[in-house]
Structure formats: structure tokens, C-alpha cells
Amino acid sequence: MKKDNSSLNFGKKIQLLRLSKGLTQNDLAKVINVSVAYVSRLESGDAKYDDRMLATIREFYNIEHAPIFDHELEDYRNRLWVWNDIISADRISDARAMQAQLSPILELHFERDLTLLYLLLETRILFKEGNLPAAEESLNTAEALLGEASIEALHLYNRNIGFLFFCKQTFKTSLKHFLKSLEYISDNVKSDAGIFLNIGTAYACIGRPWQAILYLEQAKNKFSIDRTSNLEMAINNVLATCYTFVGEYDKAKKLFDISLMQAKRINDENAIGITLINLGELYMKSGKLEASVKAYNDALDFLKTREIRDKAQELIHSDKHQQMQALAGKTFVLIRLKDFAQCKEPLGQLSTLAEGNEVFTAITETASHLTTLDDSSSTEYIEEVAIPYFKNNKMYYNGIYLTLEICDILETHYRKRKSVKKALTIAAISRDIYKEVFCGAADLD
């Protein structure tokens, strides 16, 4: 015979379970073949029970595999962190299989922190599966349990809510939560390369490449990362993009080459497309314009092949966003080359794809005006509409960098026209942006 002596004893737990299911003491008494008075004493902790009675109660409440006693709770918590490691390793099928063993915690409404941890880890799976609506719903449910949350749960909540805002392209809010999650790192909550990648990427998206580099280099140097993993590849890609912007072109090229090799080795088509596009940006920034056009063409050819194959398999999975990025990048290189005739084709394709997309519609309109700068209406549009729009657009991850590109093209135009005053005005805008990017703190309010 056993009697549980924990702070919330077995009797109190089965009472809470009974009440949560809307059952009476008589309902339980009939199941375990005892009197109502005995159930009353059992729930108050004054009656003993044997293994067979315990098994019957567990079955009645559908908690055969739920953690009831203290030693089970500790084991369950340990298994949650094993689950977390499996999720982090992108072993999603294994994670889903393990979830079936862990989900009975949802029956134990009184185990608020373990239930919260379970929901937050399930949210990570939903993010990795690309199910954003379900992830947001799960986070809304978890939010109601935050009142007595553990340090581990607060870390995971801020990490997840940060990722939700990142997916919504609300980058400053995202960064605030990522940084908050880092504050909860302790002996009980180990840091990992993923959180440093999240922070670095968010900094990159708000136009703070040096802060991004700081966290991304920490991710590479502090942690042992599988050199063939998606995590390593993502870190290299974002880091290379930041090095491109700050003019460290050799470092960027080396990292992009590694990323492309990794992506091809594991056949990650999304990463291949992104890396080819990023190489086009690198070559454009470093002045290798012909190489840039080739890289963008390689990206577009790859994306087209991928689209045709997926349509043939009836999986129609064209990455429209990547196509628009590649077409926009190619157009800006051709503008640099002053090959305006060749701009017509990518601009036409971009215009079709951008229908309904505010940002890429604005990019299309801007690029079109950049091909006709001798027309005063085009320079007026660039100065009064395009530059303010991209400079202040908090939803577009590349807004700051694109603004600098537009300013550089327009300033060059004015200098060749000997419009010194206008050139200096545009140069001042670029200078203020560079000052903010390289010297300013990230305003997260």
C-alpha cells in the first residue's frame, strides 16, 4: 500500500482531475468499487490505495502515461528537454512520435509549468513545419499560463514569440523578445547557437550588421555545430550577407561558397536559391557587375527548373519571393550597367509576380523610374516617394540597404549631370544612414 506525501498529494490531484472533468465522487467510487466516503478520504489524503486501484484510477482519468508522483514529474521534465534537443536537430518525425508519449500532461491542468513547457516545445515543432497560425494559437494558450512560469518556460516563450514576430517581419519587436530570452540563460537553461542566430538575423534585418556579426560569430565560435546542418548553413549565409554590407567581400565570398556547397550536399533547394541570390548581391556590391548578372541568372534558372519539376509532380511549389528577389537584384545590376534595354524583361516579370505585394510593387516602380532618370518626374518620384518609403519601411528586411543602393544610383546621376547641390543632398541621406547603421544603437521602442 502507498501514500503520497508530496505538497500536492495524490488525493488532491485526483480530486482536481475529477472536478476538471465534471465528475462526482460517486462516479469515481463506482469505478474503483469503494464507497463515496472512501473516495472523500482518498481525495483528502487520509485513505491508502494499492497498485490495482491506482491503475484503475489512471485508466478512468485517461492518465496512464501522465506524470503523477514527484519522481515521475522529474523524469517527465528531463524527457521534455530530450524532446527539445530532437526538435532543435530538425528530427521532426521523431519529435512528433515522442510527442504522443508526452501529451498526457495536458490532462493535468494543475501542473501548469510542465504544461506550459510542453506547449512551448510543441510550438517550436509547428514553426519548423511552417504552420504559423497553429503556432500563434499555441502561444496564445501558453500566454495564459505565464503567471507562475519557470525560468526555462520564460526563455522558451520569449524565444517563440520573438520568432512569431520575426515571421510577421516585425523585426524590432522580434529582437526585443530574442534578447529577453537570452536574459533567462542560466545553469538550468543552456544557451545554444540557434538563439544567437535569431538575434544576429534580427539585427541584420533592422540594418545593424556589426551587432549581427557579433552574435553570429559567437554562434560559430561558442558552440559545436554539425558542419552539414541547416543551422550551420543559415549562420554562414546571414553572416556572409552582413560581411557583404560592411565591405568584407573576401570573408563573405568564402562563407557563401561554403553555404552553397552545404546546400547542394544536402539538397536544400531553398538554401541554394537564397545563396545564389546573395552571391548576386555580393558581386554587385563589390563592383563585379557581370558576375552579379550571372549569379542572378543562375538563381533564376535554378528557381525556374525547380518550379517546372514541382508542377510536373503536381506539387506547384514555386518560391515566388525568391524569384522576385532575384529579378529585382538583376534589374538593379543592369541599371548600374546602364543596360536599360535589358531591364525590360526582368522588370516585366517582376511586375507580374509583385501584383498584390506592396513592397515588391514599390521596388518595381522604383526600378522603372531609375531607368529614366533624365525625366524629372522620375527623379522626383525617387526623392519624394521611393527613398522615404524604403528608409522608413520597418516591415521590409532589406529596406535600409536598398535605400543606400537607390541613393548611390541617384547621386551618381546628379554628379554626372553636374547637379552638385542635389548630389550633396542625396549624399547626406546616405551619410546619415551609414552613421546610424555603424554608430547608432538599435532603437527597439
Image (cartoon, rainbow, N blue to C red):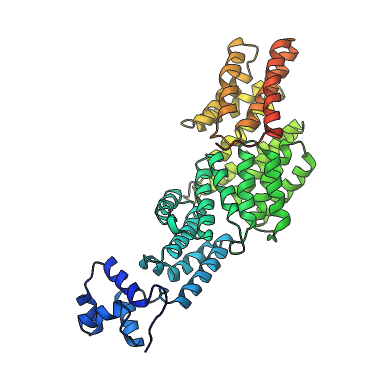
Q: Is residue 338 left or right of residue 90?
A: right
Asked where in the image residue 50 lies, by quadrant, the reply is: bottom left
Is residue 409 shown left or right of residue 394?
A: right
Can you tell which quarter of the image residue 435 is in? top right
Q: How many labels does the image show?
A: 0
Res 119 visible? yes
Seen at 65% across and 58% down, the residue is: 229
Residue farthest to the right?
Answer: 250
Residue 220 percent location from the top left of the image: 71, 54
**Front-lying residue, 94 or 317:** 94
**Residue 260 seen by the camera:** no
Taking depth in this image into account, of 336 and 17 the one nearest to the observer is 17
The correct choice, above or below, for 145 with respect to 256 in the image is below
Between residue 1 and residue 60, name the one nearer to us. Answer: 1
Q: Quadrant of residue 210?
A: top right
**In x, y percent, where is residue 41?**
27, 80
Position of the N terminus, as image quadrant, is: bottom left
226 to 434, vertically: above or below: below
Quarter of the picture holding the C terminus:
top right
Give the percent coordinates (x, y) of residue 240: 71, 44
Residue at coordinates 48% horizontally, 72% vertically from top-left?
76
Q: Position of residue 376 (x, y in %)?
A: 61, 10
Q: Position of 246 compared to 108: left or right?
A: right
92, 19: nearer the viewer: 19
Q: Is residue 406 left or right of residue 12?
A: right
